[in-house]
Image (tube, rainbow, N blue to C red):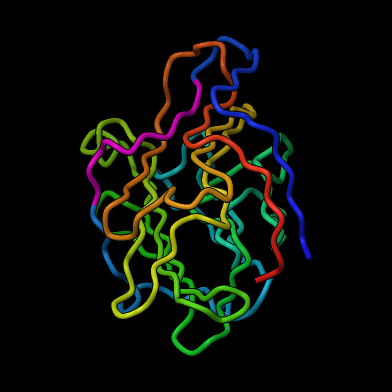
Amino acid sequence: MKTVVLASLAGLALASAASAQLSIVNNIAGSFVDISGTGTSLGLNGDDATAALAIPVGFGNAVLSDGAGVVSTNGRYNVAPGDASFTNTIIAAGSAAQGYYPYWDDLRTDAVGSNIYSQIVGDAFIVQWDATFFSGGAPIRMQLQIFNAAGQAAHGGALAQYLYQPIPGVVSYDGGSATIGAMDDQGNIAQWSFNTPGAVTPGQTVLSIVQVPAPGAAAMLGFGGLLAARRRR
């Protein structure tokens, strides 16, 4: 059993330096662009595995810079050396924690049809996970889209977006066992949810990572924390 304990954190604000902060909002439109047939495969077919994936020049930002990046089968894209941990927690400061967390959960990409792909489409650098939960269960298909300057302008200033695709004919995933958020190079954290059912609705939810003037809060939570105890899936 893997047990995660988090006190009620809704509305928590921590003192921070007077610099731009990260926030996650769900009011900027975005489009899921399936790249499973056109993207480059990372060849990452396994469980709790990582692979290097460079961010193309022009697509880096405060979360991950040009050339940086290690992708995990467990729904993370972090700075080197990356992290393949299957036990998701709240996002905490640390060099290996910097990066994107579109859906940190106990996932695997060694089932038939599972893989991780990357591709530049227009003004977005896309990373797509086609995965399953550790125990099998329903498939999950999600994307991280990182924008260049033109893409940011076209998406309300968003540095990147998380998009979740429904899988026809199966029970949908909803964030109930996942951590969703981001951490930049200054240790600023934006956490949308932690083990929160209903945190995302595939086909409807688009989460955008944006920078805002420092409000004196280094952590911004979308749905707050929960006390959770769950078995490895």
Give the x, y percent position of residue 33. 26, 63
Q: Who's the residue at 49% across and 28% down the image?
A: 22
Give the x, y percent position of residue 71. 58, 61
| Residue 128 visible in the current orientation | yes
In the rendered image, which quarter is residue 85 located in?
bottom right
Stretch in magenta: 21-30
**In screen coordinates, is 20 left or right of 123?**
right
Q: Who's the residue at 36% across and 34% down the image?
A: 25
Q: Does the magenta stretch include residue 22?
A: yes
Q: In which quarter of the image is the C terminus?
A: bottom right
Give the x, y percent position of residue 9. 62, 29
Give the x, y percent position of residue 203. 27, 59
Of 224 and 92, nearer the camera is: 224
In the rendered image, which quarter is residue 45 located in?
bottom right
**In screen coordinates, is 172 left or right of 155?**
right
198 w.r.t. 209: above or below: below
Q: Who's the residue at 42% across and 74% down the image?
A: 40
